[in-house]
Image (cartoon, rainbow, N blue to C red):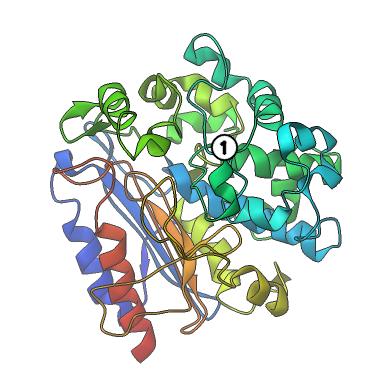
């Protein structure tokens, strides 16, 4: 299929999506929906680069949306008996036991309770050091956990992906990207689930904009200011030089599954499409229904010490409230990313939705906005009446 596709029941959703990208300054994006295992929406609009329209094969960096994909891979391995949620991470990764972390379980790690949110100052020297995935991973293994992990979650903004990837590597003996390809991407025909992006595909990556700022301040200045407040933990989740890190082409040589996933909406929607459909899509059983039930049970819902508000963390996903929907889909789960991209599954309607964009947030803030929530609320309502 090379043309855009819209099931007529979702025509209102696509009209709302198209309104997001009326002019070049709006950037571009793609939207995909599966309903009961069948494709319902596959559309794109706007611009991938200045004066270059978004194409069917355009992909974009999805930031923390990556965590949902990484988590799904971990659950595949748990289902096969290679991982036990209640075993210490150190059972599989002995070096992780350093600095008092010998009792931190896989369950705690997946629900952001490992106390390893901090990347600022984790490695000495310039930002280039963070392109060395092995060095970052080793430093996390050696680090002492934040003591607040004993009482609540602390969002691991980037470090979550390094921890998940190393766990996968330790229990399989294979590279994370190879396991992802053979366990999820290839059998689901979801090619564009990339962390280390193939060289020929890099020209397909949309240009992200604008430059990240917070309330009109540079990322670094705002981080320094946050560091003097009760939100200091949030400032610590990114290394100094973060803006330069995410705009450096070397990012696509790295494996940072908490940050640098490069996806198409189509591929992401296929992953969540299986999870919304009893774990199966096009004859491939990604996960068993009982696994999905276990992994989506809420683990913690107390004020997160990094984000400073309550996050309904499951095992690697968060709950997805679809306000302003009057029929909030309490069963929905997935992961959103900095800037606005995200994906989720809603087993109550059998629907999945993925939204990928290069326009980082709204004109007010590039950190994120309500686009995905609005699209998700409308899609949920339409799916409920389909």
- Can residue 257 be seen? no
Question: Residue 280, image x and y in percent?
Answer: 66, 74
Q: How many marks?
A: 1
Which of the 4 image quarters holds residue 203?
top left
- Decide: is 241 above or below 162: above
Question: Residue 121, image x and y in percent?
Answer: 51, 20
> Within 10 Å of the Cα at label 1, are there few (<14), some (14-19), or many (20+) other Cα atoms?
many
User: Image point 45% across, 62% down: which residue?
Assistant: 302
Which of the 4 image quarters holds residue 276?
bottom right
User: Image point 72% across, 71% down: which residue?
Assistant: 285
Question: Residue 307, image x and y in percent?
Answer: 38, 48
- SS for callout 1: helix
Question: Residue 213, image x and y in percent?
Answer: 24, 31
Residue at which label 1 appears: 159
Asked whether, in this view, residue 150 is left or right of residue 11, the answer is: right
User: Image point 56% across, 51% down: which residue?
Assistant: 112
- Can residue 269 be seen? yes
Which of the 4 image quarters holds residue 17?
bottom left
User: Image point 37% across, 44% down: which residue?
Assistant: 338
Asked whether, in this view, residue 220 is left or right of residue 59, the answer is: left
Q: Quadrant of the C terminus?
A: bottom left
- Decide: is 266 above or below 234: below
Outermost residue toward the bottom?
385
């Amino acid at each position: 299929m090379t043309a855009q596709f819209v099931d007529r029941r979702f025509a209102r959703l696509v009209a709302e999506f198209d309104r997001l990208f009326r002019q070049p300054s709006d950037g571009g994006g793609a939207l995909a929906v599966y309903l009961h295992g069948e494709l319902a929406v596959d559309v794109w609009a706007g611009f991938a680069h200045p004066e270059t329209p978004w194409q069917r094969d355009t992909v974009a960096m999805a930031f923390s949306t990556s965590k949902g994909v990484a988590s799904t891979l971990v659950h595949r391995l748990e289902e096969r008996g290679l991982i036990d949620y209640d075993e210490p991470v150190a059972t599989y990764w002995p070096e992780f036991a350093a600095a008092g972390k010998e009792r931190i379980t896989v369950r705690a790690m997946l629900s952001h309770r490992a106390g390893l949110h901090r990347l600022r100052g984790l490695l000495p020297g310039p930002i280039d050091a963070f392109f060395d995935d092995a060095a970052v991973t080793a430093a996390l293994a050696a680090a002492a956990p934040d003591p607040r992990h004993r009482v609540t979650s602390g969002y691991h903004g980037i470090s979550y992906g390094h921890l998940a990837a190393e766990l996968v590597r330790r229990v399989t003996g294979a590279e994370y990207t190879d396991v992802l390809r053979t366990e999820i991407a290839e059998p689901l025909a979801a090619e564009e689930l990339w962390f280390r992006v193939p060289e020929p595909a890099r020209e397909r990556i949309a240009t992200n904009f604008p430059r990240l700022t917070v309330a009109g301040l540079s990322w670094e200045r705002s981080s320094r200011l946050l560091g003097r407040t009760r939100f200091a933990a949030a400032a610590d989740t990114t290394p100094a030089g973060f803006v330069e890190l995410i705009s450096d082409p070397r990012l696509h040589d790295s494996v940072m599954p908490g940050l640098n996933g490069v996806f198409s909406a189509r591929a992401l929607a296929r992953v969540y499409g299986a999870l919304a459909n009893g774990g199966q899509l096009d004859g491939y059983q990604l996960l068993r229904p009982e696994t999905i039930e276990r992994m989506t049970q809420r683990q913690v819902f107390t004020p997160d010490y990094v984000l400073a508000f309550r996050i309904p963390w499951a095992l690697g996903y968060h709950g997805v409230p679809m306000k302003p929907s009057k029929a909030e889909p309490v069963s929905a789960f997935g992961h959103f990313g900095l800037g606005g991209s995200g994906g989720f599954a809603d087993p109550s309607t059998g629907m999945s939705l993925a939204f990928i964009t290069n326009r980082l947030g709204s004109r007010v803030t590039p950190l994120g906005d309500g686009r995905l929530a609005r699209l998700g609320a409308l899609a949920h309502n339409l799916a409920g009446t389909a």
